[in-house]
Image: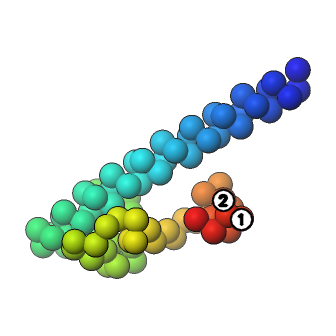
Amino acid sequence: MIAALKYKWDNKNVLDYALQEGERKKAFEIAREMKKDGLPITQIAKFTKLYVEEIEKLQPGQPLFYQRIFSPKIGSRIHILQCTFKL
């Protein structure tokens, strides 16, 4: 019974993480377009919920895979996963 619950929660955590990554990728895509159109970085950060440092490092034409710059708050689940698996 405990193994089944652990399996269920593990699957839920993986799905939640995948959804967060998808939302984050979309935010980066939107931020890159907004930056290309000349909007102020502070306004882009406000609308996309990305950090200013992340937006400043976005380069037009470069694939988002190479622009994966995360600055999550220390102690968050994403931060722990990044430290453990070096995402």
Q: Position of residue 69 (x, y in %)?
A: 45, 71
Q: Nearer the viewer, residue 19 or 75?
A: 19
Residue where numbered disc 2 is placed: 81
Residue projecting furthest to the left = 37
Image position of 57 (left or right of 16): left
Q: Secondary structure at mark 1?
A: helix
**Alpha-carbon distance for marks 1 and 2?**
5 Å
Q: Residue at x 28, y 72 (%)?
A: 62
Residue where numbered disc 1 is placed: 84
- Quadrant in which residue 61 is drawn: bottom left
Question: Which amino acid type is marked by label 1?
Answer: Thr
The relative height of residue 20 versus residue 3 in the rendered view (above or below) is below
Q: Residue at x 60, y 57 (%)?
A: 78
The relative height of residue 1 versus residue 6 in the rendered view (above or below) is above
Image quadrant in which the N terminus is located: top right
Say few, some or many: other residues with alpha carbon within 10 Å of mark 2 (under 14 / 14 to 19 / 20 or more).
few
Question: Which amino acid type is marked by label 2?
Answer: Leu
Q: Residue at x 26, y 63 (%)?
A: 31
Residue 14 got which mark? none
